[in-house]
Amino acid sequence: MKATWIWYPGDFEIWLGNKFNNRRTERGAMLPPFWKQDSHWPTVVFTKSVEMDKNEDVSIFAEGQFNISIDGHLRPTLPSFFIPAGRHTLAVKVWNQATPPALFIEGEHVVTDATWQVTYEDKIWIDEEGVAHGAGIYVPVGCGHFDKSSTPPSSFRMPATEALPVGYERCDETGKMRDRRLYDFGREVFGCLKIKGLKGTADIFYGESREEALDTEHCETLDSVSSYDSKFCLEPDTYRLDSKAFRYAFIETDIDTCYDDVAVDIEMAPFDAEHSGSFHCSDEELNSIWRVSARTLELTTQEFFMDGIKRDRCVWSGDAIQSYLMNYYLHFDTDCVKRTIRQLRGKDPVTAHVNTIMDYTFYWFISIKQYYDYTGDLDFVREMWPRMLTLMDYVLSRTNTDGMAEGRSDDWIFVDWVDFPMHKRGALCFEQLLLLKALETMAFFAAIFSRSTAINATPSVSCPLCSDSVAVLRTKIKSTFWSDTHHAYLHALEDGKRNPQVTKFPNMFAILYGLATPEEQRLITRHVMLNPDVPPITTPYMRFYELEALCQMGLHNRVLKEMKDYWGGMLRLGATSFWEKYNPQEQGTQHLAMYGRPYGKSLCHAWGASPLYILGKYFLGVRPTKAGYEEYEVQPMLGGLQWMEGEVPTPFGKISVKADGHSVCASSDGGHGWLIAAGRRVAIEPGKETIIKI
Amino acid sequence: MKATWIWYPGDFEIWLGNKFNNRRTERGAMLPPFWKQDSHWPTVVFTKSVEMDKNEDVSIFAEGQFNISIDGHLRPTLPSFFIPAGRHTLAVKVWNQATPPALFIEGEHVVTDATWQVTYEDKIWIDEEGVAHGAGIYVPVGCGHFDKSSTPPSSFRMPATEALPVGYERCDETGKMRDRRLYDFGREVFGCLKIKGLKGTADIFYGESREEALDTEHCETLDSVSSYDSKFCLEPDTYRLDSKAFRYAFIETDIDTCYDDVAVDIEMAPFDAEHSGSFHCSDEELNSIWRVSARTLELTTQEFFMDGIKRDRCVWSGDAIQSYLMNYYLHFDTDCVKRTIRQLRGKDPVTAHVNTIMDYTFYWFISIKQYYDYTGDLDFVREMWPRMLTLMDYVLSRTNTDGMAEGRSDDWIFVDWVDFPMHKRGALCFEQLLLLKALETMAFFAAIFSRSTAINATPSVSCPLCSDSVAVLRTKIKSTFWSDTHHAYLHALEDGKRNPQVTKFPNMFAILYGLATPEEQRLITRHVMLNPDVPPITTPYMRFYELEALCQMGLHNRVLKEMKDYWGGMLRLGATSFWEKYNPQEQGTQHLAMYGRPYGKSLCHAWGASPLYILGKYFLGVRPTKAGYEEYEVQPMLGGLQWMEGEVPTPFGKISVKADGHSVCASSDGGHGWLIAAGRRVAIEPGKETIIKI
């Protein structure tokens, strides 16, 4: 029996999320997010019923003060306790205000593991004789990765790998008594700068670009470290600063200060290269795009999937859902997906949209359906279900008189960063499409879970039967926003009037989410997606969905060209990771600016890595058709490439694909797959290569 | 300008409440309560708009990591910051996971004080230019008592006064090599035992009674302290244990261990004797009852009003409401009332009744109305209003099809500890009466606050207009429970049938809460309250309301006799504080037992101190008739005493009362009062003595 640390599900992520989100700094000042931060339950009870063949002494470790009871009787609080043979109910109550209460019990047969239950409220009542009755609401514990008594959850730290700069240049100024050096780490890194042998005080200015690091007045992040202060001292003579994102570090000291060496402890979530996705093809530029995309996603995969590693450094739902999808085609790190989904949701009561953004609430729901599609992990959905219900309650309590999601004061309607005028007033078609997909998600899982389960978990829930809502909303979106004149879904309904602006946003989602009929899809493709008069999308964020929609319309050749133009454009400007935004029209240092700040743009932003997803799902053509790849399709599309080969990770291992002008070929480690090509659909037998000649 | 520490309102109490409620031990094991414990908001923003005539440098102290912004621009995080002349918006964001984020700013003109606002969610949204819009829900900060930068809220500790034992006896056993001494502190104390000059290890067994301390196998609390361990070391050679309640401490050591001296640091909430209530009369026993009641209330007035100081040591709503009422006639410690009300309510979402007990939820509402009656402090009610709404939502979401409060699985229906069979199934008349009073409280304040205010504070609230609910429920209680046959309100409605049991509980509340007509009141008094066939009440808890009802019926002579019998009975058994329960029929050590445990009874229980309230309100006869004693009545009733005199604290000072067989006399420091006696009603002019001859 293997013991592991256990805690209240979601609480580890909420606590870690606060540490994570509050670690962002702007020129030295901390800069937490502006939404509600929750806390773990400070006092919880872990319990399990055991049946023992013989007596057993077990060791107990807890993060927090605790007590132990067996069959309702308190035992002395000692490092071990005795469980007599027979059937018993163990209960350990742990209180910890600062970090999540956690428990580790290690015996021969009794160990803490996923089979334990936990409550934050053991809701009992006492009779005249002092006998306790009743029980709280118990749920399965949270656990994972903390398998030693000496490494409890609060000790969590990202693994780090040391890397050295590729070189430095001296930037001394005439007449100034300062030592100034610009270190170049060769590519974007995320981690903790280390200065070895420091004697004196050093000021560090970080830059994702050379320009930023050298611009000490405007660079986004900076540090100061002194050997007279123990704050950053890691070991004698070595100082390690808090994590930052940078390629360049400009270090300024006065001439009395000296140091020997500079390095960085690079932090990234660990992954298993053996079980990761891959992609190679006849186009070297596309191979670079895939590699830099992979690097971008790896740098942004930390405790959680984060947006940009320099600025923000936050967990954002709209960014995260894209990271999840890319991740299903790269490292299949389902733990990080679950951590991020839990963190984003936080706790009840719901007082605002996820990240305060309405669209981001809807993405949160949708991401759970996608997680289920790729992993088949219903346990996680069951864990989230009560919080899905209360979040949907919040959403439905705020719809307008038409039953549509309309921004209220303090709701942020994001959609995208756009370079053209676009109102966000009234009921946006885009938001209704996301709401529709969120409701479909609820209806899908409500059909799986019995209604009674849901009601037990959250007695106050008023969420209507979502399948009805879905049909009503679907009809309403069509009748309200579709325009036969424009051959498009129009932008919004404002004060009862249609705003006839045509943007790509609702139209591409109408394709992706299956609202548009095949005829509408063709009209949209022609009159919106490929219409040069419709304002172009300039963020990789929405290009993700744009390219996906084009792929769904079979326009792989065009998508290939656009990837090479757009992502290739960043590479030609020297990108070592992909950016938050890229406008080919901009020149020189304009590429570094955003939000009115000269270096405000993030040069390593998760949503820049979408080629991972596009190439995996639409070129290699691998996608689950039954949850967790129990069934799946492989439909390779070369899109103009001479040949390509690649692998896609799945819960059971990998699916490998090869294609050229003569044949397509797939093999897999499990599941029931179909290879689709040349009008044929052939079963893929695990462990054997399946080929279709073209 | 005087600076003070500020925090999110209620969060100090929630954090302190967890420390407080988790400090209880049972034979060395911690024993937290079994209901949900909440946490402070870990990240909050404090803000204030200031208008400065000139530049100012201010010092800043925070509990937690923080940032400072002026007019939306971040400033360097330093121990002081500069505010230029002009109008500015200051905002300080503080993050603290372990203790409530708190702030202290000290300048010449800018200081943190009650005029600041705070939010846990500054809900903004960012536009393309990086400009922030929107605002969170800001509320006035919590503050009070922490007026020095060096004493932040987390440093809170109860004041302590050292006291020495009155003596000790040796209890060595023949043939055993152990040193055993029983220390007697002369009366019940609450505090930390100190052992001075300890060398070796001492085991301490505490007792509220001699029997308990000597019964090392069964005493409820114990400790062990060793000079080889720094855990309890206070200063060289002095060890101070965690707080306990006891009169006796039995200390056992082996003969190699020695110590010099034993003392106790007594902990109690501080009070101002100058502004406290008093009572003296011609009956010395009654004077003792008043003094021991006062001592009982003082011992149970700690960080919060707690129930019993030995066992439980928890904040219980049903106990607390009685402490509040007694307190209005003793020390008028409104801070402790507010702390306790905040702590009991905790945070949303509501997942169970207050302390898991349905009656206790209702008492919580009622206590706020009473607090307002005695203090006139509407600001506090306004602070609690959003949480009153959501708690009432919870209550109303769980009423049965008749609109009555009926216990659901896991709801604890307490009423009282009774020595006779009494079902708690179905809809109890007692519970409906409390619900009625709670709804009246909501309706009363809803009429004061505009509906819009309420809706803004809690958008999801579905609480119906409570004045309608009040009328409906009032009629329903009458028609359902009143029996002309029994001349009483019957016990319950079970499965659609009336349970015809007659108990005092609903009947005395029907008198107290004004449901019973004058005719019903007379019938109830004769057929229930004074009927020896109706099972007697044996807890001081419900005797509180029983005696109050008898006073309302003018039966002061009988009440005086009952007080002397019941509370006098405890005194005659040596009580130095009043007990959780007293049954005159029991003999010897039976008085110590409860909950099936030989020393399970608490010998110092707040609800034992009710004579303070009865004597102040119904004998001295002082009660506010307009909130905060803006108007009040003094209607002295000797109830058989030859003379009495006393004082009652009020927001404006005191009201003094004297009465004997010849005259009654009152004077006061403020308010508009009326002295009522001998059929007359005479205005009391502040500062002058008003007399009515009889």
Image (cartoon, coloured by chain):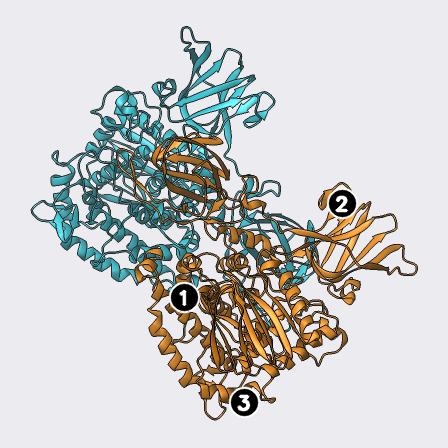
Chain colours: A cyan, B orange
x and y, in percent, of residue A197 in the image: 56, 17
Q: Distance between the residues labelled 2 and 3?
A: 61 Å
User: Which is nearer the N-term, disc 3 or disc 1?
Assistant: 1
Q: In this view, does B201 lie to the left or right of B576?
A: right
Indicate the chain on which mark 2 is placed.
B
- Which one is in front, A590 or B447? B447
Q: Is mark 1 on a helix, strand or loop?
A: helix
> Can residue A301 be seen in the rendering of this structure?
no
The span from disc 3 to disc 1 (Cα, nearest Å) is 35 Å
Residue highlighted by disc 3: B526
Coordinates of residue A594 in the picture (x, y in percent) = 29, 29
Which mark, residue B238?
2
Q: Residues within 10 Å of mark 3 (few under 14, many from 20)?
A: few
Q: Check the image and report above or below for B443 versus A4.
A: below
What kind of residue is marked 2?
Thr
Per the image, label 3 sits on a secondary structure element best described as: helix
Q: Which chain carries label 1?
A: B
- Residue B87 higher or lower than A670, as above or below: above
Q: Is residue B130 left or right of residue B310?
A: left
Residue at mark 1? B392
